[in-house]
Image: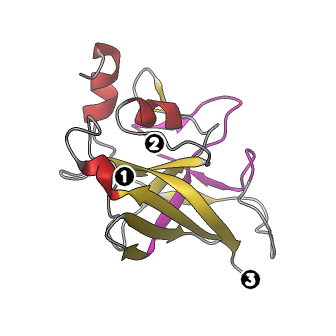
Amino acid sequence: MIPDKYICVYLLPLFGLPLCFRGRVPTRRTSPPGPRHFLHILLPSDGKPVSGAPEPEVVQLVKIEDTGIEKHVTVGNIAGDYVLVCNLDVNKPDKSLIRSCLSPQPQKNYLLFRENTKWRVAQDPLTLKFFQDFSVSYNNAENIALMLAKRESGEEYGVYWLQSWTARVR
């Protein structure tokens, strides 16, 4: 069961998502962006940055591959592409409280949460650990959570492990 203090966060819709890019976009990068990332988003009424913490990146679906055992999800933005993987077994009711091996929808914005990412909605900040507490955590790999930026009915969020990140060459 979801603790009372998170109910307002979990059920709260996120309205209006203007994207704001600021800073210089590097032309080459060999690893995912670090904590002080140059892509920022603003959710004027429902979300805001947490002081001293990196904000989630905004990404969109590039492609999905389903192997029958794992799902490989590629999402990206102007900086590069993430290849994320999840185990399809976590969608079974006996394995996890919430289905978290989800397929992002095309042409929709998702917030990408890494280990140190924080985004304040209502009282408490959303973090990767928050998503993992209600779904799954993958051992021996960097975990990533994706949450639909503009809340809609249906899929809530997904938790994956990072397989690779590739910079977009400009």
Q: Nearer the viewer, residue 60 or 102?
A: 102
Residue 25 lies left or right of residue 117; in this view the side is right
Residue located 68% across and 73% down the image: 166
Q: Which residue is mark 3?
A: 169
Percent coordinates x, y for residue 65 in the rendering: 39, 76
> What span is in magenta?
34-63
Q: Are marks 2 and 3 in contact (CB under 8 Å)?
A: no
Q: Position of residue 40 (x, y in %)?
A: 61, 52
Colour treatment of the image: secondary structure
Could you say which is closer to the camera, residue 32 or residue 109?
32
**Where does label 2 land, which residue?**
44
Real-space Cα separation, disc 2 to disc 3, in angstroms: 32 Å
Mark 1 sits on what residue?
16
Three-letter code for the amino acid on which mark 3 is drawn: Val
Label 3 residue SS: loop
Check disc 2 and give the amino acid type: Pro
User: Along the polypeptide, which appears first: circle 2 or circle 1?
Assistant: 1
The quadrant of the image that shows the N terminus is top left
Q: Position of residue 18 (x, y in %)?
A: 47, 57
Looking at the image, can residue 151 be seen?
A: no
